Image: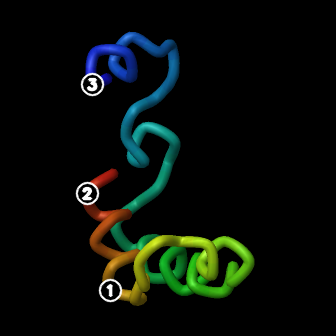
Amino acid sequence: MRQLVADMPMEQRLTQVGVRRQDIERMATDAMKVSRLLVNNPRDVSHQDAVDLYLKAL
């Protein structure tokens, strides 16, 4: 799977599309407002979970 994603002709990191570290807090806050997606997630997601996920994708 990792190789499949690596072979895709698109950016792989958020920084490659202009996201900066200082954008992460706002992105996480906005993500937590999308309740129609969060209610279907198999586990609870906290604001910090969203921040951590975005940081890993930088």
Image location (x, y in percent) of residue 6: 33, 18
Residue 20 in sight here? yes
Residue at position x 40%, y 60% in the image: 20
In this image, 55 relative to 28: left or right? left
Residue on which disc 2 sits: 56
* Residue appearing at x 51%, y 41% in the figure: 17
Q: Is residue 43 above or below residue 47?
A: above
Disc 1 or 3, which lies upstream in sequence? 3
Disc 3/disc 2 C-alpha distance (Å)? 15 Å
Q: Secondary structure at mark 1?
A: helix
Q: Label 2, label 1: how many angstroms apart (C-alpha)?
A: 12 Å
The amino acid type found where label 2 is placed reads Lys
- Which residue matches tag 3? 2
Crowd tier of the residue under label 2, counting other residues whose Cα lies within 10 Å: few below 14, some 14–19, many 20 or above? few
Residue 54 point in image, percent of width and height: 37, 63
Inspect the image, locate mark 3, and give the three-letter code of the amino acid beneath it: Arg
User: Would you name the residue on which mark 1 appears?
Assistant: 48
Q: Say which of marks 1 and 3 sits in front.
A: 3
Q: Amino acid at mark 1?
A: Gln
Is residue 58 or residue 42 the one in the foreground? 42
Q: Position of residue 47 (x, y in %)?
A: 41, 88
Image quarter (top left, top right, bottom left or bottom right) of the N terminus = top left
- Residue 58 visible from this viewpoint: no
Residue 53: x percent and y percent? Answer: 33, 65
The single residue placed furthest to the right in the displayed view is 36
Q: Residue at x 40, y 88 (%)?
A: 46
